[in-house]
Amino acid sequence: MTELAFYIADAFTDQPFDGAQVAVFPAADALSDEKKQILASEINLPLSVFLAPAEGGYKARFFTPHRELPFAAQGLVAAGFVLARLGTQEETWIETKEGKVLLRFLHREGQLERVALTLTAYPIVEAFAPPIEELAAMLGLKTLHFEIKRYYPKIAACGRPFLIVPLKSQQLVRQARFDYSAWAGSAAPMTAAQEILLFSARTQAPEADFHARLVGPDIGPKDDPPIGEAIPAFCAYLASFPELRHGTYAFTVERGSKESRRSLLYLEMDHKGQDRLEMRIGGQAAISGVGHLFV
């Protein structure tokens, strides 16, 4: 029996017990995939990250209580703060199932201020999406609530696909309620995207450019899960609109609220009109706990 340490880190926030909850296992190289899934289910946080040494850095695997994810930005930010606590202060490579990511540690006055991950994605964006009438029915909204001038619904993928839907205000993003029956009777199940990223460019927080939320058939009606896995697809979605000129863009995305573990994600993307997209996803994290399991 082995004693295995883990940390609980709250990603995309500087406040403990806020943001995205992540369990980080910094030395999980001896664990099988089956054991990782069992531990993630036992801890029962939205995400557990298992790190193992690799050439030039680490390998990372991401597990929810029910399945493995190929990538999760909140997991890498949380892992970065745990690695910094354990002595890593220089940039390091993290190998994920969606490719290698460079993890950078940004300091101010000797203190770790932010962890940023740099990755290259090869996006696929499709204009096909269910009609606005179907989207309104499955979200409990009206057709006039959807943004269709500057943006419109599309499916975007940098690995896993997401149906990305713009709404006219942050209040509507919070108000939306997913209706499984309406979803099942729409064209949505025939697409590869099984989760919907709702967003609005009209936010209440002055530091946020977008407010976003994930909903879908496997997400509880009152849940507001982390959006880190969807962020590369969201960047690809924004870059797909011809009105966006080539260049480097910096913006922030807010998730949640004071009542539902608010997160703030700092994003940069290099839009060059090519078949690949360079992006940097950064954020803070607060370590709120440490524990040991006997495996």
Image: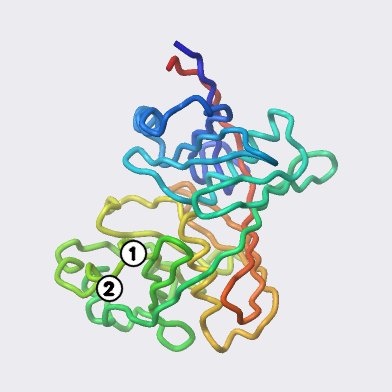
Question: In the image, what residue type sits under mark 1?
Answer: Gln
| Residue placed under numbered mark 1 in the picture | 175
- Disc 1 crowd, CA 10 A, few/some/many (<14, 14-19, 20+): few
Q: Secondary structure at mark 2?
A: loop
Q: Residue at x 78, y 39 (%)?
A: 111
Question: In the image, what residue type sits under mark 2?
Answer: Leu
Q: Earlier in the sequence, mark 2 or mark 1?
A: 2
Q: Is residue 77 above or below residue 155?
A: above
Observer-nearest residue: 244 or 158?
158
Observer-nearest residue: 60 or 290?
60
Q: Residue at x 42, y 29 (%)?
A: 32
Q: How is the image coloured?
A: rainbow
| Quadrant containing the N terminus in the rendered view | top left
Q: Secondary structure at mark 1?
A: helix
| Quadrant containing the C terminus in the rendered view | top left
Task: Judge left or right: residue 89 versus residue 136.
Answer: right
Q: Whole-percent x and y of residue 24? A: 53, 33
Q: Is residue 30 above or below residue 156?
A: above
Task: Judge left or right: residue 211 versus residue 40.
Answer: right
Label 2 to label 1: alpha-carbon separation? 8 Å
Task: Judge left or right: residue 109 versus residue 208.
Answer: right
Q: Whole-percent x and y of residue 286? A: 61, 38
Q: Whole-percent x and y of residue 288? A: 56, 31
Observer-nearest residue: 34 or 39?
34
Task: Judge left or right: residue 292 versus residue 148.
Answer: right
Residue 141 circle label: 2
Q: Is residue 112 above or below residue 256?
A: above
Q: Residue at x 63, y 34 (%)?
A: 82
Q: How many marks?
A: 2
Confirm or deny contact between disc 2 and disc 1 (CB under 8 A).
yes
